[in-house]
Image (tube, grey):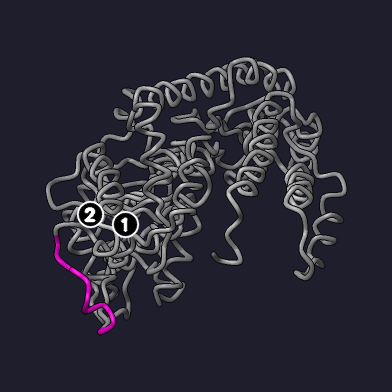
């Protein structure tokens, strides 16, 4: 028996202890503070000095973890309206526990074909959900940043080949920062990223894009990629996807849609209407850890032509000669930069089958309703202005007559309530507050309370 394997009795004791604490955590979410950072840095610095040595009791270590988790922003709570909420479904915790104990390697199909089949079924469902054609495929990633990197690398490999000189890609000022980072990691210089102006509703301007591509070709540059957003982080704005698709096709550009924030609203009738054109993308970034409410570290990338994704990422090694490398099931290690990867498919597959698709559709419809109610409640106050109308579940707002200092002080007062936690951005250079309604635990009562606190 391994020195690390507990006896069955000890394993049961630890599971019971963990279960008790986690159930208490769930029960406390409605009343727990949305943020508690009092002396949090001091605790963090103290824990940073811990070094492994003598053995500790499991319950003692759990007590340390509970204290550390309490001194934080409650990203799992109903009052978390900052950035992009996730959710952390209970079913995914069970899925991860199973996957971590069984610990099968799913990067290569030959080592765990049936489990790879489960993950492949998730990818197949996503391909169908977004209306991609036969031959499409994809991979679950650690998040949208890794997905955007793989998409950019695929576009670069397919359209630029080995010569990167003067390659150019197109974004807006509100494209997620991971795209520019991906360009840098992919070996492109800073001037390869061209920022296209936006319309008054803060969406990429198609006419400006077409003009930029023409100008760049005339200057000897090599346009190869345009990135549209299906829900920007700043405001949740959706770029004009059909128009961008037309330009990309006409100009021979790879059309990538970053739908990390808003893609899963495709499950709803309103979302499908607003995301029209996404089915024409060459690749799509998704984040199940956002609008499918899964734990952080669950992203995804779909490619219209899975063969192009594989061509950009696959590698060979003599040490793999014993494995079946047939094409009947995908080798996920050949579809992204990750070779060693966890069994991410289970944390998506289990909740989808446990709860059913209708539960997720209803939760996303509710998020749209709640964000609309929040916008209406703020718009009714003459002191508050909304610079853009929300398209998905992000509501941006600010004081009509307030400067940056006044808006920042207002944000701090709101967050001191500890019932809601908001974040901010800058729109047209002006300090702007934002609320994102995307936690499955946020309900109408909390939104009404948020409106009262904000006003």
65 sits left or right of 356 in the view: right
430 sits left or right of 387 in the view: right
Q: Label 1 near label 2: C-beta < 8 Å?
A: yes
Residue 157 got which mark? none
Q: Quadrant of residue 108?
A: bottom left
* Label 2 packing within 10 angstroms: few (<14), some (14-19), many (20+): many
Q: Which residue sits at x=75%, y=44%? A: 66
Is 273 inside the magenta-drawn segment?
Answer: no
**Camera-nearest residue between 282 and 344:** 344
Q: Which residue is mark 1?
A: 226
The magenta segment? 318-327
Residue 248 got which mark? 2
Q: CA distance from mark 2 to mark 1?
A: 7 Å
223 sits left or right of 338 in the view: left
Q: Position of residue 348 (x, y in %)?
A: 39, 42
Q: Which residue sits at x=52%, y=38%? A: 235
Q: Which residue sits at x=30%, y=51%? A: 115
């Amino acid at each position: 028996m391994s020195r690390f394997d507990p006896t069955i009795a000890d394993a049961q004791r630890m599971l019971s202890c963990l279960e008790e604490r986690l159930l208490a955590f769930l029960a406390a979410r409605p009343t727990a503070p949305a943020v508690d950072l009092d002396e949090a840095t001091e605790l963090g610095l103290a824990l940073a000095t811990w070094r492994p040595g003598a053995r500790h009791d499991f319950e003692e270590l759990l007590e340390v973890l509970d204290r550390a988790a309490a001194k934080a922003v409650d990203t799992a709570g109903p009052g978390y309206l900052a950035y992009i909420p996730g959710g952390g479904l209970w079913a995914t915790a069970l899925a991860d526990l199973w996957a971590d104990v069984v610990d099968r390697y799913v990067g290569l199909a030959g080592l765990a074909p049936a489990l790879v089949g489960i993950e492949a079924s998730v990818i197949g469902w996503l391909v169908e959900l977004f209306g991609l054609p036969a031959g499409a495929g994809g991979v679950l990633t650690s998040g949208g940043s890794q997905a955007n990197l793989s998409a950019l690398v695929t576009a670069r490999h397919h359209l630029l080949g080995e010569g990167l000189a003067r390659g150019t890609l197109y974004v807006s000022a509100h494209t997620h920062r991971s795209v520019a980072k991906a360009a840098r990691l992919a070996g492109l210089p800073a001037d390869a990223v061209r920022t296209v102006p936006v319309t008054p509703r803060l969406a990429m301007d198609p006419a400006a894009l077409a003009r930029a591509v023409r100008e760049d070709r005339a200057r000897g540059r090599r346009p190869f990629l345009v990135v549209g957003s299906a829900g920007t982080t700043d405001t949740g704005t959706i770029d004009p996807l059909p128009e961008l698709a037309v330009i990309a096709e006409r100009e021979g550009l790879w059309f990538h849609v970053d739908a990390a924030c808003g893609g899963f609203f495709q499950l709803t009738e309103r979302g499908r209407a607003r995301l029209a054109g996404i089915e024409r993308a060459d690749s799509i970034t998704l984040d199940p850890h956002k609008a499918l409410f899964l734990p952080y570290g669950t992203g995804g990338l779909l490619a219209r032509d899975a063969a192009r994704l594989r061509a950009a990422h696959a590698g060979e090694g003599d040490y793999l000669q014993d494995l079946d490398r047939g094409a009947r099931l995908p080798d996920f290690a050949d579809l992204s930069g990750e070779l060693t990867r966890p069994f991410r498919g289970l944390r998506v597959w289990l909740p989808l089958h446990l709860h059913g698709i209708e539960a997720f559709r209803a939760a996303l419809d509710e998020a749209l309703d709640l964000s609309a109610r929040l916008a209406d409640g703020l718009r009714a106050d003459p002191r508050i202005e909304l610079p853009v109308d929300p398209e998905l579940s992000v509501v941006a707002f600010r004081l009509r007559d307030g400067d940056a200092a006044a808006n920042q002080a207002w944000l701090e007062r709101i967050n001191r309530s500890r019932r809601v936690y908001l974040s901010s951005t800058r729109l047209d250079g002006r300090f702007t507050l934002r609320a994102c309604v995307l936690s499955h635990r946020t309900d109408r009562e909390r939104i009404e309370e948020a409106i009262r606190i904000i006003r």
